[in-house]
Image (cartoon, rainbow, N blue to C red):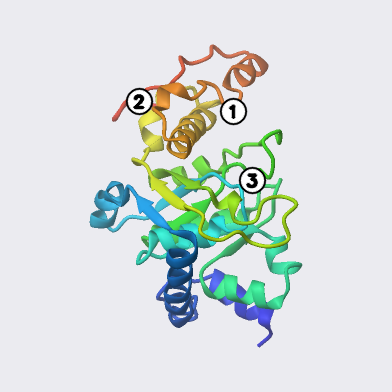
Amino acid sequence: MSLAETRERYWDNPMGAPGAPSTWMVSFLDVAMRALWKLVLRFKVYGTENLADIDASGRGAIIAANHVSLADPPTLFLALRPRSLRVMGKEDIFTHAGWAVAQVGAMSGAFPVKRDSADRKAIKRAVMYLNAGEYVGIFPEGTRMRTKDMVPRYHAGTVLIARMAKVPIVPTAVRNTDRICPNGSHFPRYFQKVSVAIGKPIDPADYDYIDKHVRNEVVLNEVMRHIFALRDDVPVDQVPLDLVGIKDLCAEKGLECPELPAKPQPGGEAHA
């Protein structure tokens, strides 16, 4: 069996199933990386209590986070332990980053997605993991925001996957990973205060009263607002109301724009 076929086997099975990602690799990375992150990066995690209800229910959830560094996926991996986290990463990681990176990534639970396309296989896999009670890590910005002047292209596929699996989205902020190896630096900088802040879950179903043509974007907008509030450690009302261009999308579709920020309405009826 080729390495590529082995990776497919890892990707096509939930954790714990025959042929699934290696439990010994996950455990090894947990121990080795935790020691490194604790000693060298002064790593801390906040807000794990916000996952208590999800853990108790046995449901999966999407961990939606900001993305500024290659260190973000392993940092999220550690923050969620001992829970299993399947991180969705760009396909290039598994095709151009070298066999060792690709193999370790696949063995530890990461799986590929084709960027800027409706990757049905990646969506199907993500839903399978969520239905199996796993956590799936997604970066809605789509790529690393290497500089402050980069314009993000937010991807509402995060919300689509959550709706398909009927799971909540947990806004999560990764802080200061960009300081480990800043742009232009050839060597890592140690003893940075790296942390992860986990927010309260957002249930996409609570926004079903929003017109279906902009519903996913409205939910994504709220998710991103909470992520940035956690990242900057400020109240969410200090974050801009329209991050993903809801008003422009409504104008384009000739729709009446919903009031922002959108308020969840548990049990509300869907707006056709």
Amino acid marked by disc 1: Val
Nearer the observer, disc 2 or disc 3?
Answer: 3
- Callout 1–callout 3 Cβ contact below 8 Å: no
Point out residue 162 in the picture as x, y percentages from the top left corner. Answer: 45, 45
Residue 244: mark in rendering: 1
- Residue 125 in view, yes or no: no
Q: Which residue is mark 3?
A: 142
Q: Residue at x 62, y 57 (%)?
A: 70
Q: Residue at x 37, y 53 (%)?
A: 45
User: Relative to 41, is 100 above or below?
Assistant: below
Q: Point out the tag, 2 or 1, that comes first from the N-terminus.
A: 1
SS at circle 2 = loop
SS at circle 3 = loop
- Residue 5 in view, yes or no: yes
Q: Residue at x 39, y 55 (%)?
A: 44
Task: Answer left or right for 148 relative to 270.
Answer: right
User: Relative to 54, is 272 above or below?
Assistant: above
Amino acid marked by disc 2: Glu
User: Relative to 202, is 77 above or below?
Assistant: below
Amino acid marked by disc 3: Gly
CA distance separating discs 2 and 3: 31 Å
User: Relative to 82, is 236 above or below?
Assistant: above
Q: Which residue is mark 2?
A: 269
Point out residue 13 in the picture as x, y percentages from the top left corner. Answer: 49, 71
Residue 75: mark in rendering: none
Camera-nearest residue between 215 and 269: 215
Point out residue 151 in the picture as x, y percentages from the top left corner. Answer: 69, 33
Q: Point out the tag, 2 or 3, that comes first from the N-terminus.
A: 3
Task: Answer left or right for 170 relative to 102.
Answer: left
* Quarter where residue 267 is shown: top left
Q: Point out the tag, 1 or 3, that comes first from the N-terminus.
A: 3
